Amino acid sequence: MEILGLFGAGALAGLGVAVPLGAIGLLLVRQGVAGGFVVGAAGAAAVALVDSVYCIVALGAGAVVAPVLGEWGAAAGLLAGAMLMALGVAGLLRERRRPTASQDQPGRSSVRRPAPARFFLLLLGLTAVNPATLLYFAALTTALRPTLAAPGGAVAATAFVAGVAIASLAWQLGLVAAGAFWGGRITPRGQVLVGRAGYLLVILLGAGAALAALAAPSTA
């Protein structure tokens, strides 16, 4: 397979894992609305970094790691769900302590923005605790193993990972940019309501992840 084709395959794989809008995507959009592009972009970089690292791990040891994660996948799903629910509840509590803005003119709200490094670490941890991304890449890269074992396999793997990284980062930045665009056009009161709705969705998604982990058949 040509290098360009592997890069394209990686880009499609990156979009495949990034495009479905879940809790992480909602957090990126909300950060764009409430805090602007710069802080949200740090979170987008964290998500793309985890996608890239999991892709590298899957290429190198996916056949070994995937069965292991499959054995404790239910516990990991419960942990991820609990973390998302805790994040949503904490966000709602912060929003409740903050009075709803009375201004009706569109513009950026006065909500305190987290430091980019803090938001980066938050999104890094939330994305990393979900093993589904690694399982996704482990299954997807099975067909690439003959190519990687052939001469020039390292170059092929690099092209594939580059495609994943660029596509994932582009999509996450697009979510942040969309939030930032609308954040400057929503009134402060509307931004607070959007924030509360976003945190409620994060709680629901976390509960869904935990319930799905409980309902998953045991591999023991």
Image (cartoon, rainbow, N blue to C red):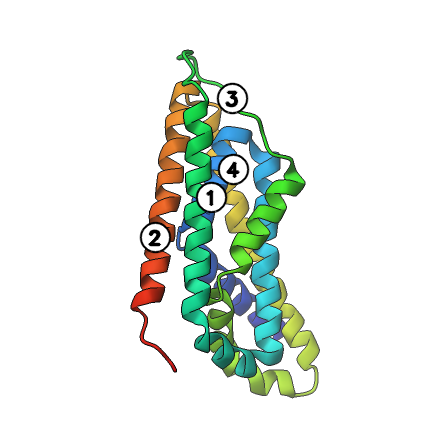
Please determine whether, in this image, residue 22 is positioned above or below residue 198: below
What label does residue 108 carry, if any? Answer: 3
Residue pictured at 29% horizontal, 67% vertical: 215
Image quadrant where residue 117 sits = top right
Q: Position of residue 217 (x, y in %)?
A: 31, 75
Front position in the image: 200 or 15: 200
What label does residue 207 carry, if any? Answer: 2
Residue position marked by numbered label 4 in the rendering: 177
| First along the sequence among labels 1 and 2 | 1
Local crowd size for mark 3, using a 10 Å CA cut-off: few (<14), some (14–19), many (≥20): some
Please determine whether, in this image, residue 61 is positioned above or below residue 39: below
Of badges 1 and 4, nearer the viewer stands 1
Q: Secondary structure at mark 1?
A: helix
| First along the sequence among labels 3 and 4 | 3
| First along the sequence among labels 3 and 1 | 1
| First along the sequence among labels 2 and 4 | 4
| First along the sequence among labels 3 and 2 | 3
Q: CA distance from mark 3 to mark 1?
A: 23 Å
Q: Are marks 2 and 4 in contact (CB under 8 Å)?
A: no
Q: Secondary structure at mark 2?
A: helix
Local crowd size for mark 2, using a 10 Å CA cut-off: few (<14), some (14–19), many (≥20): some
